[in-house]
Every structure is written in C-alpha cells, then in structure tokens.
C-alpha cells in the first residue's frame, strides 16, 4: 500500500463522524438499536452523528418529546454531537400526481424542523431535490439556522448539468444557507469487487463480468455496456452489473477544491475495507489530503454500503467495516501514526 | 437490498379469524420507511399459484389495509425493518406442513426512474393458528 501522504502535524479542522446508515444491516434486523449505533460510533472516536430520521425514528415525521429527550441524552452520555440529518423528498408520494412545489417545500420544512429538534445544523438534500425547491426553502433554512446541502452522488459530478443548475442557485442564495454534500462514491477508481463477486454468485458469466470490470477500471466507455453485454449473450444479472458500471464514476478528488466554500459535509461512502486497512475502490489516501488542502472544516462521515452486496453469502459486520474506515481516516487526518 | 429478509421464516400460520388461508410476516426491502401510498404491491405466490391481491391485506403496527386502500394512505408508514402481516384468504384451508412462499414487493421510490423493491422465495413450515384444533 502507498504510505499515507504527509499529513501528520498538518493543521485542519476536519472531524470524524458516522452516518447511522452504515449500520443498516444490524438496525434492519434489530440486532443493534439506534443507541447501539451511536455508541459504536463513539467507541471509534467518530463523535459526529449523522442520522436518517425516516430510517431510524419510528413514527417519523412525528417526533415525540420522549424520543428527542432520549436522543439528546445519548449524545451527552456518549460524548457525540449531531452533525447532519438526511432528508428525502417523496415527490411521488401519490400514485397519480407529483407533489407541487408548495407541497415539496412543506416536506423539506418539516425535515428542517426535525433537524432543529435533533440539534443537527445540516440537512442533506437527496439528489432528486430540484434547484427550484432548494431556492424556495432557503429562507426557511436560513431562519432556522440550518444549512441545506445537496448530495453530489454518482453518477452526478460537479460538471453535470443537474449540479451546475444547483450551483447557480447556490451562488445566488449564498453558501451559508445552501451547499454541497459530496458522496465519495463519485471517486470510485476501481470497480468494487464486492459487487462483481456478488454477480458471479448470482450466476453471471465470468467473461462478461470481467469485461464489465475491465471496461470500468480502464476508464472505457461504459455508455453502451448494457448493449454489448446483450450482444454477448448476457441476461438480467449481467445487465444489472453493466448498469452499475454506469452508476459508478471516477472524479479526480482535486475537483473538490473549486467548490470548497460550498462543501459543508462529506459522506465517506465505502463498499469494502480490506484486511490491510484500505478501501478497495475509493482512494481515501488521495481524497483526505485534498480536503485538508482545501480547508474543509466539516465532518467526514462514514457511509458503509457494502452490506447489500455480501449479505447473500457472508455475515455482515458493519461495525468492523466502519471501525476499519475510521482507523484509516484517523491516520490520514494525522490523528494517529 | 434486503430481499433475503422480506419473508420472516418464523410465524407462517393459519389465519387468526379462522377463515381458510394464512398469514406471514414480511419486511420491506429498503433502507428507510415509506408512507404506505408508495407501497405499490406486495404480491404473494403460494405453491406456485398467485394469490389475487383482493384476497390479501397488509397489517402495519395493528392497522389492517386492503391493497385498494394502500395507495391513499399518506399518514401511516411501514418502518424500516418493521414486520408487517400479509394475510391472505384461500378457497380451501392450507394443508399442514411445508409450503412454497414467494413474495414480490414493489415500491415507488421518488428518486428512482424504475420501481424499487425486491423478490424472495422460501419454504415455510405452517404453524397451526389459534383457530385450529390442537
């Protein structure tokens, strides 16, 4: 492995955190409670807690006073701080019509209210939030002291028209209210092997899997991959893998520098921490130095998303995976040797 | 994601109301809860025979809905990992022993252009319900 870039002693104001999304396998199966998730993060020195209210809070969108009290108590007991909530926008709530802009704005306001009660200063706007709803809700966010950050999630990237449209609104409204929350899944350099291995277990033809992985890894043109896989006799499993290859992207981490004033929080997405302590696909040893260089002053928040690719054949241990990533991040941030 | 956990292996049973048919516990294959209006289908195939949706209901934390009602339910949610009860009626009482049970769930996820959800199939051992003679 490449030795860590020289970060020891470098000055930065980056904190470490965990999105409770990371423990979705255990929470789904009720082998970990929400408090267990908070405690696990704290145990790794990841003191920033990111939560998806509609994942972790039964009864959402109604928060009982009792839950809010327990939440703040967990933060106190475990020494953690709420750093962000994640908001979804169910524009297709009704089967026969899309939510109007007013209804969408009301939905986001409700999520801002929840963030305020939980004490989180940042709300993630899922990638389907339109520039119009971001602009419409901005005054409410500002009034409530909440920053609304659009996730930059693969296959989108900073030069994508959808993000460019958002950036225009952000420039107009101001970075103190609106901004970006990049998901490090936009820096997938190598095709995640947990994904290709799963396709093989599901019966995909090895030569087609190899073709898809090589095309991705060689920065080949992935646009027509599904068609080629079809010409080569692939079926649904191979098509799904080919589609995945168009949904991962490699963006040079240095592209973050130009947008740093807007970047308020980073979702440290990962698929597989290997036994040697690195992420198989995403080069954090290149990403973290860029964040330091750019003066990023927010939270690097673990987002483990490997469970879904291995749960068919292996025991999922999200806590161990997150612990390994946190250990890597602490090293890259110069907290540990 | 979570397809393999849709069907809860324990708890496949005859109907509590004594009518012919059964009940099983199911979970939504998704990483967050959803308002029920976005649950487009929970389709059941029993021993290779599709059970008509009008013969099924979904009970979420104690409230029972028909699948004609679900599209309009925007004030109740199926929580992440929550066990809901899929109850179904059949023409004849279920035979004791093992059954082949397949469940497909279709979800309307606003940020996805295609339906979400998943499908799974299990061999389940029927437990006798309270309505059955011991």
Image: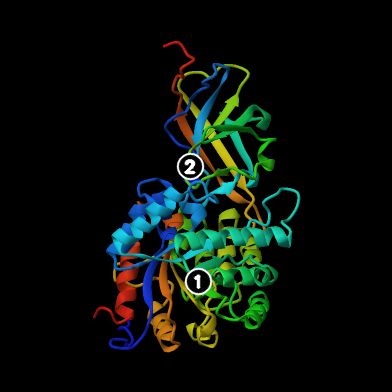
Q: Is residue A77 left or right of residue A243?
A: left
Q: How is the image coloured?
A: rainbow
- The chain that hosts pointer 2 is B
Mark 2, other Cα within 10 Å: few <14 / some 14–19 / many ≥20: some
Q: Helix or strand or loop: what does disc 1 sit on? A: loop
Measured from the top left, where is residue A210 in percent x and y? 50, 67
Depth check, mark 1 against mark 2: the one in front is: 2
Residue A274 appears in view: no
Q: Nearer the viewer, residue B37 or B125?
A: B37
Residue occupying the point 44% across, 59% down: A21
Eyeballing the image, is A234 above or below B89? below
Measured from the top left, where is residue B12 in percent x and y? 47, 28
Mark 1, other Cα within 10 Å: few <14 / some 14–19 / many ≥20: many
Which residue is at the far left?
A337
Residue occupying the point 52% across, 27% down: B23
Eyeballing the image, is A91 above or below B55? below
Q: Is residue A79 left or right of residue B110?
A: left
Residue occupying the point 43% across, 54% down: A68
To which residue does mark 2 refer? B82
- Image quadrant where one finds the N terminus of chain A: bottom left
- Image quadrant where one finds the C terminus of chain A: bottom left
- The chain that hosts pointer 1 is A
To which residue does mark 1 refer? A183
Eyeballing the image, is A14 above or below A241? below
**Which label sits on residue A280?**
none
Residue occupying the point 49% across, 76% down: A264
Which residue is at the far top?
B133
Measured from the top left, where is residue A67 in percent x and y? 43, 50
Report how far apart the C-alphas of labels 1 and 2 lie in the structure. Answer: 28 Å
Which residue is at the far right?
A96
Q: Nearer the viewer, residue A261 or A325?
A: A261
């Amino acid at each position: 492995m490449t030795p860590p870039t020289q970060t020891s002693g470098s000055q930065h104001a980056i904190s470490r955190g965990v999105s409770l999304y990371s423990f979705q396998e255990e929470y789904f199966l009720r082998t970990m409670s929400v408090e267990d998730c908070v405690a696990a993060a704290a145990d790794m020195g990841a003191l920033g807690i990111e939560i998806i209210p509609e994942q972790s809070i039964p009864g959402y969108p109604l928060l009982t006073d009792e839950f809010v009290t327990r939440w703040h108590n967990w933060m106190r007991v475990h020494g953690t701080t709420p750093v962000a909530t994640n908001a979804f926008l169910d524009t297709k709530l009704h089967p026969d019509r899309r939510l109007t802009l007013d209804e969408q704005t009301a939905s986001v306001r409700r999520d801002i209210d929840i963030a305020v009660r939980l004490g989180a200063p940042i709300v993630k706007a899922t990638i389907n939030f339109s520039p119009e709803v971001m602009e419409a809700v901005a005054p409410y966010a500002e009034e409530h002291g909440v920053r609304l950050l659009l996730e930059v999630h693969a296959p989108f990237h900073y030069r994508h028209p959808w993000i460019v449209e958002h950036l225009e609104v952000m420039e107009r409204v101001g970075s103190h209210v609106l901004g970006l929350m990049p998901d490090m899944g936009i820096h997938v350099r190598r095709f995640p092997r947990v994904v290709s291995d799963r396709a093989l277990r599901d019966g995909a033809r090895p030569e087609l899997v190899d073709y898809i992985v090589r095309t991705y890894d060689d920065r080949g043109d992935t646009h027509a991959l599904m068609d080629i896989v079809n010409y080569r006799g692939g079926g649904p499993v191979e098509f799904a893998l080919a589609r995945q290859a168009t949904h991962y992207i490699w963006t040079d981490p240095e592209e973050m520098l130009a947008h740093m004033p807007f970047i308020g929080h980073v979702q440290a997405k990962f698929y597989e921490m290997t036994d040697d302590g690195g992420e198989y696909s995403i080069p954090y040893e290149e990403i973290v130095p860029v964040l330091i260089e750019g003066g990023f002053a927010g939270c690097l928040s673990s987002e483990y998303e490997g469970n879904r690719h291995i749960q068919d054949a292996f025991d999922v241990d999200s806590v161990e995976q997150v612990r390994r990533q946190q250990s890597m991040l602490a090293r890259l941030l110069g907290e540990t040797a | 994601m979570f397809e393999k956990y849709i069907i809860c292996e324990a708890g496949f049973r005859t109907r509590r109301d004594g009518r012919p048919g059964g009940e099983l516990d199911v979970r939504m294959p998704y990483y967050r809860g959803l308002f029920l209006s976005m649950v487009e289908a929970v389709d059941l195939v029993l021993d290779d025979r599709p059970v008509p949706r009008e013969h099924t209901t979904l009970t979420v934390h104690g409230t029972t809905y028909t699948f004609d009602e679900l599209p309009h339910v925007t004030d109740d949610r199926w929580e992440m990992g929550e066990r809901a009860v899929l109850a179904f009626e059949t023409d004849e009482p279920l035979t004791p022993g093992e059954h082949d049970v397949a469940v497909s769930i279709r979800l309307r996820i606003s940020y996805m252009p295609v339906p979400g959800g998943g499908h799974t199939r299990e061999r389940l051992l029927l437990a006798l319900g309270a309505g059955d003679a011991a």
